[in-house]
Amino acid sequence: MDHPRNNAPPSADRLHAPIARLLRPLVRLFIRSGMTFPGLVDLLRELYVNVAEYDFALPDKEQTDSRVSLLTGIHRKEVRRLRGAGAPISATPAAVSRASRIIARWLAAPEFTDSEGRPLALARAADQGCAEPSFEALVASVTRDVRPRAVLDEWLDRKLVEIDADGRIVLAESAFVPQGGSDQQLYYFGRNLHDHVAAAVANVLGEGPRFLERAVHYDGLSDGLAESLEKRSREIAVAALQEANREAHAACAQDPGGRHRWIMGVYIYRDEDASAEDAPQIEARGDKAS
């Protein structure tokens, strides 16, 4: 039986524990990257003012310094100084957008995949009058703003593709996992975590139908089993993402277009639980989906 949902947001004191857990890996990144606490405070202050100004504006009423100060707890002088900076910009870097669109098409379009949906090895360019799929045709089907040779050189340098013994271009596994610390990885780091957290926050606040946001997790595992489960879950996840990409790619061909966006994401994680040795094994183990 479905029970009515309480749409009142949780109190601030109830958020302390989950937010502390959520922020811990981020704080680890901040410290390792040299982002100091004062620097983070400055960023949060600007973000608090920006979110209050744009996300909490009242219909048909001008947002005031006093109201932003009331919502955020930031002094009006600081609010006045920080307001007017504009809404946060989340533009996709051109190279990232171009690469992701080309790879998505390579993984989804029937002319660039085999009978099992795997990306084909592509010739650099098709012979005149030949219908054979080529890397040149792939790039041209997505953008004509850059030469296919320039894309190939860039991708070879980034190890997104390889050249096989027959001189064909093969999509490398690294194309699915951007290099650590690269601009591409940092872009998706912000985008993917934003969307995951946005879905979870919408569920907590009860804003409309719940988004699917679940995880399967086991504790108290041996290192070997944890490694095996990670490997198998990668296979399952990649297959699911590729299938979703193929269906979305095909559906977009018939869609008139609009203002909406959709994302399906997957994450897999394992580590050593420092508290596992002290926990009773009967409680430490268990299959859960949350």
Image (cartoon, helix red, strand yellow):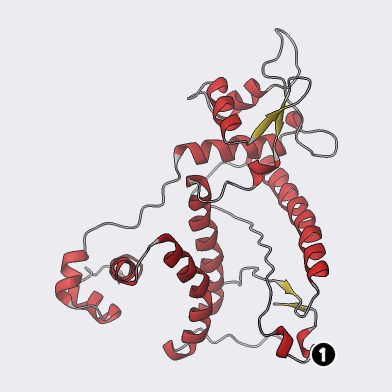
Where 176 falls versus 37 (above or below)?
A: above
Residue 24 image point, x, y percent? 50, 74
Q: Nearer the viewer, residue 149 or 9?
A: 149
At horizontal 71% and vertical 34% (from top left) the residue drawn is 109
Give the residue pinned by disc 1.
Answer: 282
Where 224 falls versus 140 (above or below)?
A: below
Residue 45 image point, x, y percent? 29, 70
Where 261 falls versus 78 (above or below)?
A: above
Residue 16 image point, x, y percent? 46, 86
* Quarter-of-image position of residue 57: bottom left
Asked if residue 260 shows in the view, the reply is no
Asked if residue 188 shows in the view, the reply is yes
At horizontal 62% and vertical 36% (from top left) the residue drawn is 159
Residue 228 image point, x, y percent? 82, 63
Label 1: which secondary element: helix
**Quadrant holding the N terminus:** bottom right
- How packed is label 1: few (under 14 Cα within 10 Å), some, or many (20 or more)? few
At horizontal 78% and vertical 23% (from top left) the residue drawn is 165
In the image, taking residue 14 as reference, residue 179 lies left or right, namely right
- Could you tell me the amino acid type at mark 1? Ile
